[in-house]
Image: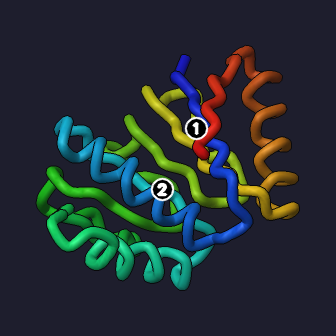
């Protein structure tokens, strides 16, 4: 069973939600954890891709958008709206509205929720799906 963590960002700003995602991605990368960031669309993937280049001037996180072609390098962060490729399926940061496919086979799953009503609604639905699968997610409030 995966460890599932919900991070509740105390803001309605999508930008602050993505900023927190960048910090979580950076922390994972520093611990040699190469994650997949699941988004809802190519546009959302591009926005996060751009933000990873600029969110902190002292940070460098090798990353790439995933568009059906598995990269040759495995030691990078992938961002995409499709199912995570095998190597990246272990650790998923979910910024999408749905549960990742085959979430039961991943090791760690991170959900980032803000105070936007739609984001909270979809987050609650996913939380209930995880509970129905027998997993009790951990919840962390981010001030």
Q: Dot 1 corresponds to which residue?
A: 102
Image height check: is 115 above or below 32?
below
Q: Dot 2 corresponds to which residue?
A: 20
Position of 52 with respect to 74 (left or right) is right
Q: Secondary structure at mark 1?
A: loop
Instruction: Indicate the position of residue 71 as horizontal and vertical percent values.
Output: 21, 64
Q: Secondary structure at mark 2?
A: helix
Q: Quadrant of residue 41?
A: bottom right
Instruction: Indicate the position of residue 117 as horizontal and vertical percent values.
Output: 87, 61
Label 2 Cα neighbours within 10 Å, binned few <14 / some 14-19 / many ≥20? some
Q: Quadrant of residue 111?
A: top right
Name which residue lies at 44% across and 73% down. Answer: 48
Q: Nearer the viewer, residue 10 or 135?
A: 10
Task: Say which quadrant the N terminus sits in.
Answer: top right
Instruction: Indicate the position of residue 99 as horizontal and vertical percent values.
Output: 68, 46
Discs 1/2, front = 2
Instruction: Indicate the position of residue 135 as horizontal and vertical percent values.
Output: 68, 18
Image height check: is 104 above or below 28?
above
Q: Nearer the viewer, residue 83 or 128?
A: 128
Name which residue lies at 83% across and 32% down. Answer: 128
Name which residue lies at 46% across and 44% down. Answer: 92
Position of 124 with respect to 98 (left or right) is right
Earlier in the chain: of badge 1 and badge 2, it is 2
In space, the residues marked 1 and 2 are separated at their CA atoms by 25 Å
Label 1 Cα neighbours within 10 Å, binned few <14 / some 14-19 / many ≥20? few
């Amino acid at each position: 069973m995966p460890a599932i963590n919900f991070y509740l960002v105390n803001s309605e700003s999508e930008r602050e939600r993505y900023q927190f995602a960048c910090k979580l991605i950076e922390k994972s990368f520093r611990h040699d954890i190469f994650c997949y960031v699941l988004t809802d669309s190519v546009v959302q993937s591009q926005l996060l891709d751009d933000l990873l280049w600029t969110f902190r001037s002292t940070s460098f996180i090798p990353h790439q958008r995933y568009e059906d072609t598995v990269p040759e390098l495995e030691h990078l962060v992938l961002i995409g709206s499709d199912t995570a490729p095998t190597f990246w399926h272990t650790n998923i940061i979910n910024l999408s509205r749905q549960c990742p496919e085959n979430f039961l086979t991943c090791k760690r799953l991170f959900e980032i929720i803000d105070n936007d009503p739609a984001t909270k609604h979809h987050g609650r639905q996913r939380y209930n799906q995880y509970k129905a699968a027998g997993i009790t997610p951990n919840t962390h409030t981010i001030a």
